[in-house]
Image (cartoon, helix red, strand yellow):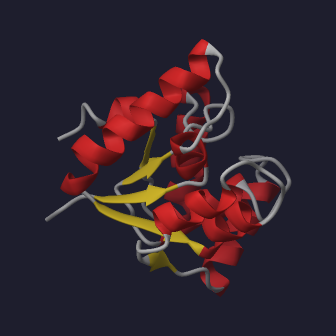
Amino acid sequence: MIPSVYIETTIPSFYYETRVDPASIAMRDWTHEWWYSARGGFDCFVSAAVVDELENGHHPRKQEKLQLVEALPWMEVNSEVEEIVAVYLANYLMPNDSLGDALHLAIASFHKADYILTWNCKHLANASKRQHIRRINERLRISTPEILTPLELMEAP
């Protein structure tokens, strides 16, 4: 069975990153490398949350970011996902924004994604949050995806 990956909003954002500081350049390059060399080994998904974040706001290369993910299938946002988001927020798992990181985590967890691919290392790919995420998901009896950056997922099977 091919592992599934939920592509969080930071991935298309860094794919088309325009900043020229060394960290941003490295993240853009690793995103490109994952997209072209590793993506084929996974079933990749996005959600309405990803597309909404890309559509809203003013940021460079918005249309290109949307085109990058437009052919990917979507994981559905439903009432069960919304209930999971409420639990995450009530347990201070993610910032108090029902349309942000908690929603991405809830979508991927509910749909049993194997991985969440992200550059959000503050709230998602954060080692200090892993145990808290697992504990809450265990209480909810839902799976917990591995939350990784493209650099880390290139090392995965």
User: 142 or 122: nearer the eye?
Assistant: 122
Q: Residue furthest top?
A: 22
Q: Based on the displayed image, in which of its 4 quarters is residue 81 positioned?
A: bottom right
User: 47 or 146: nearer the eye?
Assistant: 47
Residue at image coords 43%, 29%: 29
Residue 141 shows up from this direction: no
Where does the image place residue 54, in percent across and percent down from the top left? 68, 61
Where does the image place residue 8, in percent across and percent down from the top left? 55, 54
Residue at image coords 56%, 65%: 140
User: 96 or 140: nearer the eye?
Assistant: 96
Q: Based on the displayed image, in which of its 4 quarters is residue 126 positioned?
A: top right
Tell me if residue 73 comes above or below residue 3 in the rendering. Answer: below
Where does the image place residue 122, in percent across and percent down from the top left? 68, 32
Residue at image coords 17%, 41%: 157
Where does the image place residue 50, in percent across and percent down from the top left? 62, 64
Q: Based on the displayed image, in which of its 4 quarters is residue 73 positioned?
A: bottom left
Tell me if residue 149 comes above or below residue 67 in the rendering. Answer: above
